Amino acid sequence: MKKVALVALALVTGLFASEGQEFEGLLTTPACAAQGAFNDCYLENYTCGSDGCFKKINAGETTKPKLALFQHGTGKVYTIDVSKLKVSELGEGMNKNGVVIVGILDEKTNTIAATEFKAPPPPKKSFFKGCL
């Protein structure tokens, strides 16, 4: 009986371990990360992939731009494979620091196969006292 319980525990632990590891950083596009333009990253980068791309794409045409996670501490940029996530849910984390991507890292391509996304908490409300 104890052997069966240990085998079951090992299988459950293995299933949770295969889910991936957590990566925290700034959610952006590879082009913005390469330029280091985090605050100045144009909105069109998130919709079609690069600066000035609206000039090349017809109206109503949809694209799937690549996303990247930039880690300030290490300076690494990871490409994110979001095929298992809803891209509409990622909107609240775009161009924000403290985003957590859970997934499996492919070290050869430096790509995270994302399985889960956690947005940073919203900023606390502040009250301004004084004259303007």
Image: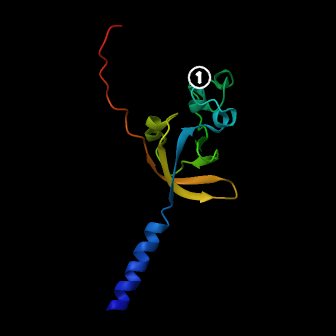
Disc 1: CA contacts within 10 A as few (<14), some (14-19) or many (>=20): few
Q: Nearer the viewer, residue 44 or 106?
A: 106
Q: State whether residue 124 is above or below residue 55.
A: below
Q: Nearer the viewer, residue 117 or 26?
A: 26
Residue drawn at x 32%, y 8% is 131
Quadrant hosting residue 2: bottom left
Q: Which residue is mark 1?
A: 59
Q: State whether residue 33 is above or below residue 106.
A: above
User: Which type of secondary structure does the marked residue at label 1 adopt?
Assistant: loop
Q: Nearer the viewer, residue 3 or 47?
A: 3
**Left or right side of 58 for 124:** left
**Quadrant of the snapshot with the N terminus:** bottom left
Residue extending farthest to the front is 130
Name the amino acid type tagged 1.
Ala
Residue drawn at x 34%, y 85% is 5
**Quadrant of the snapshot with the C terminus:** top left
Residue drawn at x 29%, y 22% is 127
Measured from the top left, where is residue 92 in percent x and y? 43, 35
Residue extending farthest to the top is 132
Quadrant hosting residue 8: bottom left
Q: State whether residue 61 is above or below residue 112.
A: above
Measured from the top left, where is residue 69 in percent x and y? 58, 44
Measured from the top left, where is residue 10 in percent x and y? 43, 79
Quadrant hosting residue 13: bottom left
Residue drawn at x 67%, y 21% is 55
**Left or right side of 49 for 6:** left
Measured from the top left, where is residue 49 in percent x and y? 63, 33
